[in-house]
Amino acid sequence: MDNDKIKNYIKEVCKYIREDDVIEDIKNELNDHILTMTEDYIKAGYSKDESVDKAIKQMGDAKIIGR
């Protein structure tokens, strides 16, 4: 599942990460977590777009997550 909203959210989170050596690991972990939540929402009957939006919202503010 490839989604610009997910990529943009992860990019926003990574702007606040100070340690460059962990960024790739964090990107992968966030992507996996968001995709899992998105799939759960889809199984619950939401559309793909709604599911992505709900998963990102559930993750929280990118600035806070990135710190």
Image (cartoon, grey):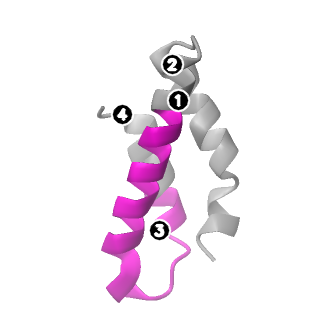
Asked whether residue 62 is drawn in magenta, I would say no
Q: CA distance from mark 3 to mark 2?
A: 29 Å
Q: Which residues are magenta?
A: 11-38
Amino acid at pointer 3: Cys
Q: Is residue 27 above or below residue 67?
A: above
| Circle nearer the viewer, 4 or 2 | 2
Precedes in sequence: disc 3 or disc 4: 4
Q: Nearer the viewer, residue 29 or 57?
A: 29
Q: How much space separates mark 4 and mark 1, taking CA atoms?
A: 16 Å
Q: Is residue 27 magenta?
A: yes
| Labelled pair 1, 2 in contact (Cβ < 8 Å) | yes
Query: Label 4 sits on what residue type?
Result: Asn
Quarter of the picture holding the N terminus: top left
Q: Amino acid at mark 2?
A: Lys
Which secondary structure lies at badge 4? Answer: loop
Give the residue at mark 1: 40
Dominant SS of magenta comes to: helix
Q: Write down the residue under mark 2.
A: 43
The residue identified by callout 3 is: 14
List the residue tagged with mark 4. Answer: 3
Q: Secondary structure at mark 3?
A: helix
Marks 4 and 1, the one that precedes in the sequence: 4
Image coords of residue 52 (percent x, y): 52, 30
What residue sits 59% from the left and 30% below the top?
53
